[in-house]
Amino acid sequence: MAAARHDARMSARPAPAPSASLPTTADPMPLLGIDHVELWVGNAQQAAYFYEHAFGFRRVGYRGLETGARDRTSYALRQGRVRLVLTGALASGSPIAAHQRRHGDAVKVVALAVPDAVKAHDEAVRRGARSVAAPRRERDEHGSVALASIAAFGDTVHTFVTREAYDGPFLPGYAPVTTDVAPPENDVVIGLDHVVGNVELGRMDEWVRFYERVFGMTQMRHYSDKTISTEYSALMSKVMADGRGRIKLPINEPAEGRRRSQVDEFLEFHEGPGAQHLAVTTRDIVATVAELRRRGVEFLAIPDEYYDDVPSRVPEVARRLDGLRAQGILVDRDDEGYLLQTFTKPVGDRPTLFWEVIERHGARGFGDGNFKALFQALEREQARRGNL
């Protein structure tokens, strides 16, 4: 495969001067959705094997020494509309290795698909974002992609991606990959519902204002420490979303409690702010979770008594109750419908990153009625780790 190229002219463009006025006639920051999520990990090859065999992702692209990359190895995986990239360092002194030493296997990039990456980057900088990678165009025989990046909470970055007519396996520089790993008969996950970020105490509103100012997002939900609490711990959360609801980014911070919350535990072992969990959607959560369990994914345990009042709270699921109970699925409703959700245990050595599986039937919320049951399940795991 031909080595990827980029246009230096785009990298040299100066950022426009800040302006107090913002355009009002058209959306200056249109967002098309989450293009991909990239994790920086200790061993990309082994991480790719895990996500293939445990979660049913399919390996579609590879970048490494054989494709001309000298500092990293990356595997691009896909399932449904979800793109996942796993990147490992080829040298101990690289930023990738430093990130993994500090945070463990963790999300580095939440990439956003946009109509024009150059304009998105410049508009974000004009609105106060910090640029970490100036606009550039990367090319190979499959076409070209425009990329640019800004800083987000902690060491996380948002990369703007404009693919135009690119038809390669992932991005320029990635060679196509085929494996003999048998995928599930059907995709177990079909899309990315939301990405949750944890930040330090007192900084949630700062990042809420960042997403309002830079992206024009609005606050979709606000959960106080009275809403999300148990006897022992609490947290606060505000859910940010773009105008079309394609991108949802809940931001959590810890709250005072008798003991340490899940956010406190995350901040300690992640050694700072970062993405706490990725929520993926499915059409049949009972079948999906059963398949993931068969593949070795571990989920939080939900007490049997939780299901005693489920038929009265959400009558629509009464016929599915046995399957929901067997797979530990939480049930909630709002004014627009109901949802089913469950959560994995942490997927790495550190009690940090985990996954949520969610099946929506009209509901746009985040399982408000499940917060107590969920937190109690999380606290049981924290207690087993000695972190409550």
Image (cartoon, grey):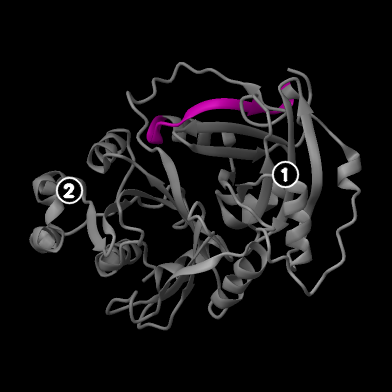
- Residue 66: x and y in percent read 72, 21
Give the crowd class for mark 1: few <14, some 14-19, many >=20 residues within 10 Å. Answer: few
Magenta-tinted stretch = 53-66
- In the displayed structure, 241 sits above or below 134; it is below
Say which residue appears at 58% left-offset and 56% top-offset. 103
Answer whether residue 111 is visible to the viewer in this image.
Answer: yes
Secondary structure of residue under mark 2: helix
The magenta stretch spans residue 378:
no
| Amino acid tagged 1 | Ser
Graded by Cα atoms within 10 Å as few (under 14), some (14 to 19) or many (20 or more), the crowding at tag 2 reads: many
- Left or right relative to 21: residue 215: left
Which one is in front, 132 or 191?
Answer: 191
Q: Mark 1 falls on what kind of element?
A: loop
Q: Is residue 168 left or right of residue 14?
A: left
Q: Residue at x 61, y 73 (%)?
A: 209
Seen in the picture, residue 184 relative to 233 is either above or below; the reply is above
| Residue 357 versus residue 124 in the image, above or below | above
Q: Which mark is residue 324?
A: 2
Inspect the magenta stretch and tell me whether residue 60 lies in it: yes
Q: Which residue is mark 1?
A: 92
Give the quadrant of residue 40: top right
Q: Is residue 353 visible?
A: no
Of label 1 and label 2, which has the lower sequence position?
1
Tell me which corner region of the image, top left, top right, bottom left or bottom right, holds residue 70. top right
